[in-house]
Image (cartoon, grey):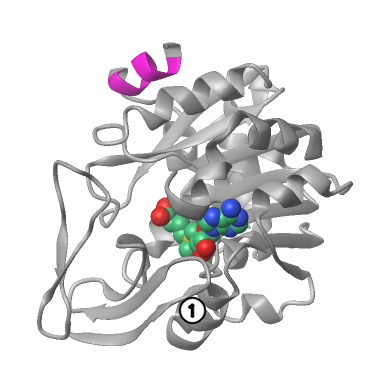
Amino acid sequence: MTGEWFTETLHPAVAQRFRVEKVVYRDKTEHQDLVIFENAAFGRILALDGVIQTTTGDEFVYHEMLAHVPILAHGRARQVLIIGGGDGGMLRRCLMHAGVEKVTMVEIDRSVVDLCREYLPSISDGAFDDPRTDLVIADGCRFVKETDQRYDVIIVDSTDPIGPGAVLFTPEFYADCKRCLTPGGVFVNQNGVPFLDEGEQPRTYAKLRVLFRDVWAYGAPVPTYYGGLMTFGWASDDPALRALPVEEIRRRFEAARIETRWYTPELHAASFAVPRLVLDILER
Ligand code: SAM
């Protein structure tokens, strides 16, 4: 594969490709086909079942927006649950919040964690060794069905709704997540790119609306999630959490003393202003 091109197989009608400078690791794990390779523009890239998951070059955009927005909006999150997130980038961002006492991360594939720790260490940057980390190797869908723990923020950092990630887009899974949230808790999930995953998105929002008083979307453009704006699902029973004045978000952010490369309080507030295309999907 070295010297060749890696062509992503996510969308039937379009594909993006990356030149492979070097294959770092390739294996078929118990759950999926895993490859880590180097690319001159994006650094080290992890792909699972032919789909780009993360790159050392742009991971900060996705991880900062999917972690800091719900945690700062919540304002007093102590217990955080991550479903998926094997590379550890989400875990690292959650642990930056001093008020967070424990982050439980439920990842189905131990190989993703082990190989990312070895070959993409900058993404987790020691987060797996933090005493506040509770790593559980299990199916996230099963975990939320069986646990009696409660969480202030639940972040679903999953693969797309194919392969092992498909169960993380079902009404049963969303209902179990709702049950696992403390009152005032926030649920967020990666919800694809509206231009290319249009079918996936309305189904997510409609399923969440049955369970939560406030369901919305926010977004970020992640270069290697091809197709423009990536959207995140947002669900809570408190509509005020996504309408905080920017001054209050700034106060919380400054108090948290977190260093970011993408997230700003202004961007946080603005990210809930979604394009008409996404409003139409939300209203369906
Ligand atoms: N940011 C990425 C994206 O949008 O493509 C997701 C990255 S993260 C590496 C996705 C992780 O979800 C993978 O490590 C995969 O093993 C994990 N995963 C998939 N299905 C799962 C399930 N049912 N339970 C727990 N983890 C799951």
**Residue segment shown in magenta:** 277-282
279 in magenta: yes
Quarter in which the N terminus is drawn? bottom left
Q: Which one is nearer the viewer's eye here, 161 or 97?
A: 161
Left or right of 78 in this view: 234: left
Is ligand 1 closer than 8 angstroms to the Cβ of mark 1?
yes
> Label 1 sits on what residue type?
Cys
Quarter in which the C terminus is drawn? top left
Res 181 seen here: no
Q: Residue at x 37, y 26 (%)?
A: 274
**Corner quadrant of residue 33:** bottom left
Res 18 seen here: yes
Q: Residue at x 42, y 32 (%)?
A: 270
Q: Residue at x 51, y 54 (%)?
A: 164
The residue sitting at the right extreme is 148
Left or right of 109 in this view: 8: left
Rendered view: 199 above or below 256:
above
Pointer 1 local density, CA inside 10 Å: few below 14, some 14–19, many at least 20: many
Residue pointed to by mark 1: 116
134 in magenta: no
Residue 122, image x and y in percent? 46, 80
